[in-house]
Image (spheres, rainbow, N blue to C red):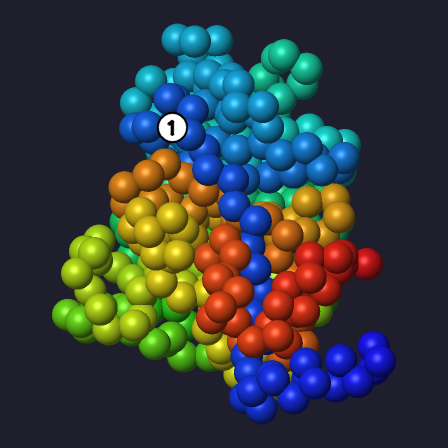
Amino acid sequence: MKLAFAFLLLLAVPANAALVQGLDLIELTSPQFANSTVLSIAHFSDGTRVMSDGANLIAEDGSLTPLYQVDGGPLAAGSGGTWSLAIDSSDRLHVNEGATGRIFRRDGTDWTLVATIAPFVDDMKFDAAGDLIVATRVNDQSTNLWRVSAGDGSVTPIASGLARFKAFDFDADGNIVFSEYIAGAIHRVHPITGADELLHGPLAGGTVEGTPVLAEAILVTAGGNYVIGLDRGVDRLSDIDGNRNRLDRFNPSTGDVITLGLDWTGFNGDGFRTPIDFDFDNLGQMQLVASGSIQPQALIGDLDLDTPGLTAIAGIAPEPATMSLLALAAVGLVRRRRHV
């Protein structure tokens, strides 16, 4: 009887049904977020989350730790705040002073200056060897890459004059991958020689005015795919061309690009969300912070973007009436998956 019922259910599934993955959404509704934009997210080895709005560290419970010197932090007034967070293998948090290129490490309640690179720091991450890789922008036109040695703290250049990008990640071979800020062309940079390889040209545009998309974030998944957070470039709710803020997935083996998340109006209908930063927690779950045009930021978790056949990401949870039975089953399966 059960088998017969299951067979009837399968007959009800459209042949072209898309595999849809649901989202878990946590609104940051505390008053301190009303006039701020969350810029970065990172995780300690136990999975504890930390974020920053540039002027504060934001703990998982919503409590704030000021980053400016006037409030006991390491950053000088007028230094532009911190634009990225990095955590080393010893669970020590690092912040940057964007406009000066200074990088500080948190030791207990104290802050230690570990390096001075160059302004303006857009992103930084620790590689597998424990070196800190830092990306700095030059006059908003190009990006330079630097290495801070885990051994003696020395700073050496990796590459200069790269197309400008705001975020990078590492592939399984330790290469540095990024998506150009303007239009999103995808590159891979050798971590020693600095050789720059173009993997894919500009991604599809973003507005009815023809403005290119802006690549805000990138993350390499456990399956080796690159997930790119794209801003449509113009903050207008009237744009209706179907290419707004979105997540794209790039397969470096095949060169294929598919759009997974499109038009973040699904989040309570409160306007578009720009994917700002990604990170993996200790369970391999992808978490993303996104800015909202009306409401404060959102945190999205429990995403497995390597899911075979995944063709879309739906806001919060799709309405059952509009989903195929296959899609509903996929949501349940995906939420139980974890990266190894």
Residue bearing the label numbered 1: 33
User: Whole-percent x and y of residue 36?
Assistant: 34, 30
Sort mark 1 into few (<14), some (14-19) or many (20+) by Cα contacts within 10 Å. Answer: some
Could you say which quadrant of the image residue 21 lies in? Answer: bottom right
- The quarter of the picture where the C terminus appears is bottom right
Q: Nearer the viewer, residue 302 or 165?
A: 302
Instruction: Report the side of 159 relative to 270 (left or right).
Output: right
Query: Looking at the image, is 147 positioned above or below residue 50?
Result: below
Where is residue 165 drawn, in percent x and y? Answer: 41, 57
What residue do we see at 56% from left, 87% from top? 14
- Secondary structure state at the residue bearing disc 1: helix
Up-down relation of residue 266 to residue 308 (above or below): above
Left or right, 156 with reference to 5: left
Q: Residue at x 56, y 76 (%)?
A: 324
Whether 233 is drawn above or below 281: the answer is below
Name the image quarter holding the N terminus.
Answer: bottom right
Q: Residue at x 30, y 23 (%)?
A: 78
Would residue 108 be found to the left or right of residue 116 on screen?
Answer: right
Location of residue 82 with respect to 220 vertically, above or below: above
Please state if 54 lies on the left or on the right of 303 as rendered: left
Q: Measuring from the top left, give residue 151's x and y in whole percent.
A: 74, 37
Q: Closest to the observer: 311 or 202? A: 311
Residue 221 visible in rendering = no
Q: Amino acid at mark 1?
A: Phe
In this view, the residue farthest toward the front is 1
**116 vs 334, nearest the viewer:** 334
Residue 48, visible in the rendered structure: yes
Task: Find residue 285 and report its horizontal and vertical position in percent.
Answer: 67, 52
